[in-house]
Image (cartoon, helix red, strand yellow):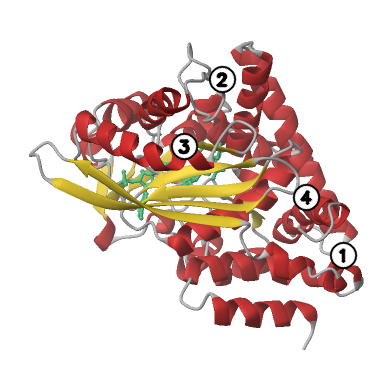
Amino acid sequence: MGYIDNIISIIEKKDAGQVEFLQAAKEVLDSLRIIVDQDSTYEKAGLLERLIEPERAVVFRVPWVDDSGKTQVNRGFRVQFNSAIGPYKGGLRFHPSVNLSIIKFLGFEQIFKNSLTGMPIGGGKGGSDFDPKGKSDNEVMHFCQSFITELYRHIGPDTDVPAGDIGVGGREIGFMYGQYKRLVNKFEGVLTGKGIGWGGSLARTEATGYGLVYIIDEYLKSKKDGFKGKKVAISGSGNVAIFAAEKASSLGAVIISMTDSNGFIYDKDGINLDTIKEIKLIKRERLSKYAEVHKSSVYTDAEKGRVWDIPCDIALPCATQNELLLDDAKKLAANGCRVVGEGANMPTSLDATEYLIGNSVAFFPGKAANAGGVATSALEMCQNSARLSWSFEEVDQKLKNIMTGIFNNIDNAAKEYGKPGNFVLGANIAGFKKVAKAMLDQGVI
Ligand code: NDP
Ligand code: 2IT
C-alpha cells in the first residue's frame, strides 16, 4: 500500500463516522499523490500522519440562560489544526448541525486556504451547535459571553484569532470581543470581523464575496472574457452570497437566483440586492419575503426544486457543505454552465467536483475561491498590530492582488504537475507545499 492510501486507511479507522472530515481529507490527500510518491522525505518525516491530526481540539460546555429563565446548554468547539506558518486562524460557526467532524473538515481546509493567501496564518476553526435563528439579541449575547468565558484561555492575537462563519456576523463578534476584553483586560486583535471604529477593517465584510468574484474574473480575463452579461446563479443569501452578488452585478452580471435553507428565488431580470440586504441582514427574515415584495420573482420551496436546475453561465454555491451534488453538476453542465466557484466551504460533493472538472467546467475550490475573507482578516490583524486603519480602497486593492496571486499560483501548480485547468489539484498542492516545508524546517512537532 502506498503512503497516501495508508494515511487514508488510518483516518478511515481512527475518524470513522467523521464523514465531512474524511471527505475533505481524502480530496487533499488524493491531489498530493503526485508529489508525495516522488519524494520519500515526507513519509520518513511522518509528515502526513502529523498533518491529519489537529495540534489540539478543545470541546467545552456552554451554559446560558434564555429569556424565559431556563438554562440551556450547548457544545463549543475549537480545533487548532496547524500552526506551522502562523497563529491558528479561522472562523466560528454557530449552527445546529455543528459537530467535531464539521469543525475538523473546516479546520483542515483552512490550513491550505490560509497558506494560499500568502499571509502568515495557520489553520483553525470553531463553533457551536447553538442556533441563533429565532433568538433575541439578549439571548445571543448571553450565549456569546458564555462561549468566550471558556474559549478566551485558548486564544489570543499571537495564538489563535477566530472570526465569523455561518451564524456568526458583526453582532456575535461584538458580543464575543466585549467579553474577551473584560476577561483579559486588554484591547487587542484577538478576533477579526470587528466593527469599524473598534479595530475592524474596512472591506472585511465584503471580502469573501468580492474575492470570489475577483478570482473568477481573473480566470475569465485569461480567456478574454468577463462577467458582463453573464447569468449567475448563487446559493445562500448570507454574508458571502450577498457580496458575491454585489460585486458580480457591479461588473455587469445578472444575478438570477439566491437561496436560504427553506427555498430559493428566481428573478430573470436580476435580483434586487437592496431588498435582500434588508430582509437578511437587517430584519433577519426568510427569503420567501422577497417574492412578496418583487412580483417578478418566483419562490420555490427547497423540497420542491433545486436552484441548480435553472440554466446559468456561472454558479456560485455560497451557503454550506454538500449543497451541489452529482445530479446538480450534470444539470449545470447540460444547461451550459461554464464556471463553478465555491464561495462556501466544500459545497460540492467529491463526485460532483470530478464530474465538473471532467466535463470542461472551470471549477474553483473553496480553499482558493473563498480565501479573500481570511486574507482580509489577516490584513485586519496587520492593521491592529500597527494600530492604524487603511482606507476601503487600500484594503480592496490588496484583496484584489491577493486573489490574482492565488489564481496564478493554483494555475501554475496545475500546469507544473501535468493537470492544466485542474484548480483542485493546483490549490491542494500549492497550499500544501508551503505548510509542508515549514513543518519539515521546524522538526518533529
Ligand atoms: P451566513 O450565516 O451569513 O449565511 C449562510 C447562508 O447559507 C444563509 O443564507 C443560510 O440560510 C444558508 N445556509 C446555511 N446552512 C444551510 C444549510 N444547512 N442548508 C441550506 N442553506 C444553508 O454565512 P456566510 O455567508 O458567512 O457563510 C456561507 C459559507 O461561506 C459557509 O460555507 C462558510 O463556511 C463559507 N465562508 C465564509 C466566510 C466568511 O468570511 N464569512 C469566508 C469563507 C468561507 P438560512 O438563513 O436559512 O440558514
Ligand atoms: O472559512 C473561512 O475562511 C472563514 N470563515 C473566515 C475565516 C477568518 O478568519 O476570517
Residue receiving disc 4:
410
Q: Nearer the viewer, residue 205 or 341?
A: 205
Quadrant including the N terminus:
bottom right
Disc 3 or 2, which lies upstream in sequence?
3
Dot 1: few (<14), some (14–19), or many (≥20) neighbours within 10 Å? few
**Could you give the CA–CA distance between mark 3 and mark 2, rounded to whole angstroms?**
22 Å
Q: Which residue is mark 2?
A: 201
Any part of residue 237 in sight: no
In this view, the residue in front, 417 or 304, is: 417
* Residue 303 visible from this viewpoint: yes
Q: Quadrant of ligand 1?
A: top left
The residue carrying mark 3 is: 152
Asked where in the image residue 215 lies, by quadrant, the reply is top right
Q: Residue 2, relative to residue 103: is it above or below?
A: below
In space, the residues marked 3 and 1 are separated at their CA atoms by 46 Å
Give SS at disc 2.
loop
Task: Give the residue at x 12% y 36%.
Answer: 67
Q: Indicate the amino acid at tag 4.
A: Ile
Q: Which residue is mark 1?
A: 418
